Image (cartoon, rainbow, N blue to C red):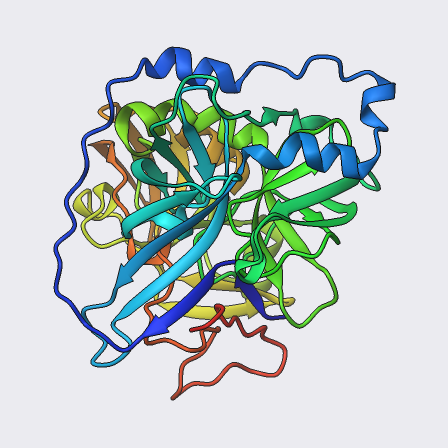
């Protein structure tokens, strides 16, 4: 399965060494501006939700914009400057524009093209490559341009009619029609760190649709189009709009999403697995990987070094096993993630570890999670990414990921 970001990129053979400067956010009331995006749609009665798609397009498309930006790759001797294009949609009267992070993150000269053809400079207020969500600001007269209504992605059902509006392949204001074909889809083989429960749709999504809205028949944006499977027939994915609602305020006010950082990757180790391999282990979460420079590494937590496959499941043994965190037993990775997410930067964490028949207790303060190399899309020099490399090609049953135009 080949997965591509729906980002349209034109390549030019020029290299310019420009250091990007962070623009100061405009002086707007972020709390009131963001509150506008949370306003529920009015009049979403059954009669409205079954309006003809042409009428829905006329009502929704003025809030959809085209976005262009310049990417500079200093490591490329050729094709060093790339002009990328994507989509976005206006979500407030103050000119907030929601889009994908991979359309605008670490880009220069971001320009928004409005429905009426006007080009306006955009300021990047905040971007999060992990959730692939970004917020721009454009200067417009208050109420001059219609804003998109944001729906409730928790109420989306499989089989529901949807349309994707965007600018695929620079074809402005293109509408494609389909249904919601799946919910809570995870795409672990993406070359990006996106690990969200995505909305799957068969509405065709193409390069350039990135950041555009997935719209229900009520005329509400229920998702942000972000991924497509290029070797399949109309399998695309959108970020649920409720996730965007949760982080817009942080992106506007802080320019980023502030997360606590452990710096470990864990896997549950069950009693059944212990009995099979006949190694003296305990129930808990097996630490397989420790990020360099992380609080976990500074606390002396150890990762694995012995790859083992048990009944088709792969383990990296040899690392510490977490048996307690702050006095609670982390039963599985999901519960562990919930416990971690409930903590704040600066809080103290106490872990009980099992290592080589001994119990250890460690304590450390949570730092803010930085951006890691795995959070960002592949460099422009990479044409293919998969489970292997040129020296270690992917096996037959491993899915190869190829970012678009890379």
| Residue 301 percent coordinates (x, y) | 26, 48
Q: Is residue 154 left or right of residue 288?
A: right
Which image quarter: residue 257?
Answer: top left
| Residue 291 percent coordinates (x, y) | 27, 53
Whether 64 is drawn above or below 390: the answer is above
Residue 332 can be seen in this image: no
**Most extreme residue toward the bottom, as rendered?**
391
Residue pictured at 24% horizontal, 18% vertical: 27
Which image quarter: residue 78?
Answer: bottom left
Residue 293 can be seen in this image: yes
Residue pictured at 25% horizontal, 32% vertical: 366
Whether 233 is drawn above or below 237: the answer is below
Q: Nearer the viewer, residue 398 or 208?
A: 208
Quadrant of the rendering where the C terminus is positioned: bottom left
| Residue 151 percent coordinates (x, y) | 65, 25
Quadrant of the rendering where the N terminus is positioned: bottom right
Whether 330 is drawn above or below 372: the answer is above
């Amino acid at each position: 399965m080949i997965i591509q970001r729906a980002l349209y990129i034109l390549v030019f053979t020029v290299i310019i060494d420009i250091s990007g400067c962070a623009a100061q956010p405009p002086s707007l009331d972020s709390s009131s501006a963001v509150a506008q995006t949370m306003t529920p749609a009015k009049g979403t009665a059954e009669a409205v939700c079954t309006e003809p798609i042409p009428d829905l397009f006329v009502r929704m498309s003025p809030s959809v914009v085209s976005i262009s930006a310049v990417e500079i790759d200093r490591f490329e001797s050729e094709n060093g400057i790339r002009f990328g294009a994507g989509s976005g949609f206006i979500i407030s009267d103050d000119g907030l524009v929601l889009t994908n992070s991979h359309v605008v993150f670490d880009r220069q000269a971001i320009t928004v093209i409005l429905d009426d053809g006007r080009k306006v400079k955009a300021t990047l207020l905040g971007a999060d490559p992990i959730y692939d969500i970004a917020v721009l600001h454009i200067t417009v007269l208050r109420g001059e341009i219609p804003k998109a209504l944001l729906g409730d992605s928790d109420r989306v059902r499989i089989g529901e009619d949807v349309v994707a509006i965007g600018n695929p392949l620079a074809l402005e204001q293109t509408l494609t029609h389909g249904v919601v074909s799946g919910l809570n889809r995870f795409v672990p083989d993406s070359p990006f760190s996106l690990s969200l429960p995505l909305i799957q749709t068969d509405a065709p999504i193409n390069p350039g649709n990135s950041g555009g809205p997935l719209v229900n028949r009520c005329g509400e944006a229920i998702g942000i189009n972000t991924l497509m499977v290029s070797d399949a027939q109309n399998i695309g994915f959108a970020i649920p709009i409720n996730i965007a609602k949760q982080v817009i305020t942080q992106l506007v006010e802080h320019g980023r999403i502030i997360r606590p950082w452990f710096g470990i990757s864990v896997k549950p180790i069950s009693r059944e697995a212990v009995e099979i391999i006949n190694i003296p282990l305990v129930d808990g979460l097996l630490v397989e990987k420790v990020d360099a420079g992380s609080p976990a590494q500074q606390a002396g937590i150890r990762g694995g070094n012995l790859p083992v496959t048990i009944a088709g499941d792969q383990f990296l043994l040899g690392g510490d096993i977490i048996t307690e965190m702050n006095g609670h037993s982390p039963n599985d990775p999901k519960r562990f993630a919930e416990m971690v997410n409930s903590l704040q930067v600066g809080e103290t964490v106490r872990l009980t570890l099992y290592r080589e028949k001994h119990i250890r207790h460690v304590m450390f303060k949570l730092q803010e999670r930085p951006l890691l190399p795995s959070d960002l899309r592949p460099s422009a020099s990479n044409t293919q990414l998969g489970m292997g490399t040129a020296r270690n090609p992917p096996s037959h049953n491993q899915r190869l990921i190829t970012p678009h135009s890379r």
